[in-house]
Structure formats: C-alpha cells, structure tokens
Image (tube, rainbow, N blue to C red):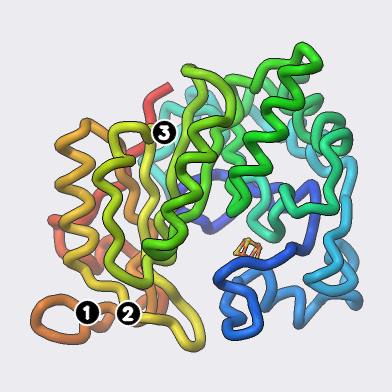
Amino acid sequence: MSKNTTIQWCDSTVNPTMGCDGCELWDRNRKSCYAGILHMRFGGATKGYAPSFEEVTLFPGRMAEATRWPDLRGKNRSDKPWLNGLHRLIFVSDMSDALSKVVSFDYLKDEVIANVTSEQGRRHHWLWLTKRPKRMAEFSAWLKDRGIEWPSNVWAGTSITNQRTISRIKHLLNVGDEETIRFLSVEPQVEEIDLDEWLPKADWIIHGGESGHGARPFDLRWATSLIERCRNHDLPYFLKQLGSQVVDGSGWLSFEDNHAGDWEEWPKSVRVRELPRV
Ligand code: SF4
C-alpha cells in the first residue's frame, strides 16, 4: 500500500490481498504483469508480499489503515493537478486481484465494504479494479441479498487489453446500481479494440500502452481516436502513459521517460487527463 503513489490517475493504493490467479498478462505464455514481476523478486522473502504470486494471501487491516489517511477534499495536488477538487482517490488492488477465487465474499465484506463505508472511509473514493468483473457482480448481488447496497464511494472498474477481453464489460454493468461509477482501464492496449458499443455505458476511460520487457506497440492513433470518441459521448478520458514501444503512422516515437508517462513530452492533442466530476 502506498499513501502517495506515482500512478497518475489516483492518489494512493491499497491491497487487501496480495497475489493473483492470473490473466492474459500472466499465464503460461506471458509474464508481464507488474505485480507478478515484483512478486517474483520479493514474494516469500519480503514482508507484505504473498509467498508466491499464485498463492493469493489476505492482508486484513490494510483497508482500515487507508481509511485513516488525510482527507484530500479541497486540497491541491501539485504533482497531479487533474485530481484537484476530488476526494482522495485510492486504487484498490494494484498488486493483486482481490476477486481471485480463493478470496471469500465474507472477507471482502468485512475488509473492503465495512471500511469504505465507515465514517473515515466515506471521506475517500475507492477505485476497485478487477479483471474478474463477473465475480465482482456476483459479490454485488451477494451483498444485496444481505441488505447491503454497493457503496456509492466505490467506483467499479475492469481492464480491457484486447478485443477478446471486451466481454468483461457486460459483467461490470451488473455491479452496483445506476449511481455506481463504472470505469474501463484500457491498459495496456495491445491491439485495435472496438469499444463503440460500450462507451455510452461507461463513466470514465483510462487508456495507455504497455511498458517493460517484451512490451507490445501502442499506436498513438488509438489515443487520438479514443479521445475523439469519448468527446462524442461527453465521457471523461485519461491517458496514463504511452508505454515503451510507441508508433504512429510514420514510425517509432521515442521519449525520455521510459514509460512515456510524462505528458509534457506528448503531442498537445493527446494531453488529456480528465476524471468524473463527483
Ligand atoms: S489480473 Fe491483474 S494482478 Fe492478476 S495477473 Fe492480471 S494484471 Fe496481474
């Protein structure tokens, strides 16, 4: 967990679990998930990590600790001015997928829901990202059966990386109710993706390219196109980073920052970092 993260679209991160069941970024053929790579280095040897990435481990108490972080309402962030005016935005699960199958709904209720709805927790917004939105929707229904509404300060998000993973969005739409903020993290985008059908149903788009060893190319025209489509739907769009392999119609582009996350280096037309105004 980190009170001050360098991730551009949030203030902080917290992990009620560590480790993961895997996804298209962590399987037999590919090992590019950042959380997985860190676990290969530190897992089992460093306090706070799972014994290995595949052994999803519970860390009760972290959510409660995060609720106590200072309120950021009305505070300016000099390094992330696009977040000014918002509550503290806390990314839930950047080092894990808390909807991995061994994590029980009872644990998620007690650790996540109870804390975010506490007096302290309600001062923040919690951005819960998963590649398992089907299980998140099941959890949402399970809570409802127990008389617990999806908290309005929990934004529900899923990641889309290629055309095949678009199927996650229909499950995300079953999380919460009509007030729930639902976001798509289209990152890392590794191929052409048609999102047109889904943009009117989303509340926020995060976008970016892949970085690190074996990164696949990100075409800058994907950003210009998605920015335009989001504009057409009055949908806030946030370009996080271009990644380490960037192309446009004329060839490869190079940047000082090895993730191309410094927007000062980008063409002005793609310097877009917007958030839902809530
Ligand atoms: S679901 Fe998230 S944490 Fe799990 S392997 Fe994939 S990218 Fe990593």
Mark closer to the chain start, 3 or 1: 3
Question: Dot 3 surroundings within 10 Å: few (below 14), some, or many (20 or more)?
Answer: some
Q: Which residue is mark 3?
A: 84
Residue 14 located left or right of residue 219: right
Please report the residue visible at 51 percent of the width from the left and 56 percent of the height from the top. Answer: 7
Query: Label 2 near label 3: C-beta < 8 Å?
Result: no
Please report the residue visible at 13 percent of the width from the left and 56 percent of the height from the top. Answer: 269
Residue type, label 2: Pro
Say whether residue 94 is visible.
yes
Calculate the distance from the C-alpha at mark 1 to the C-alpha at mark 2.
7 Å
Question: Dot 1 surroundings within 10 Å: few (below 14), some, or many (20 or more)?
Answer: some
Please provide percent x and percent y for residue 108: 80, 37
Choose mark 3 or mark 1, whichever is in front: 1
Q: What label sits on residue 106 in the rendered view? A: none
Calculate the distance from the C-alpha at mark 3 to the C-alpha at mark 2.
32 Å
Mark closer to the chain start, 3 or 2: 3
Query: Label 2 near label 1: C-beta < 8 Å?
Result: yes
Q: Please, is residue 117 above or below residue 258 in the view? A: above
Q: What label sits on residue 247 in the rendered view? A: 1
Residue type, label 3: Asn
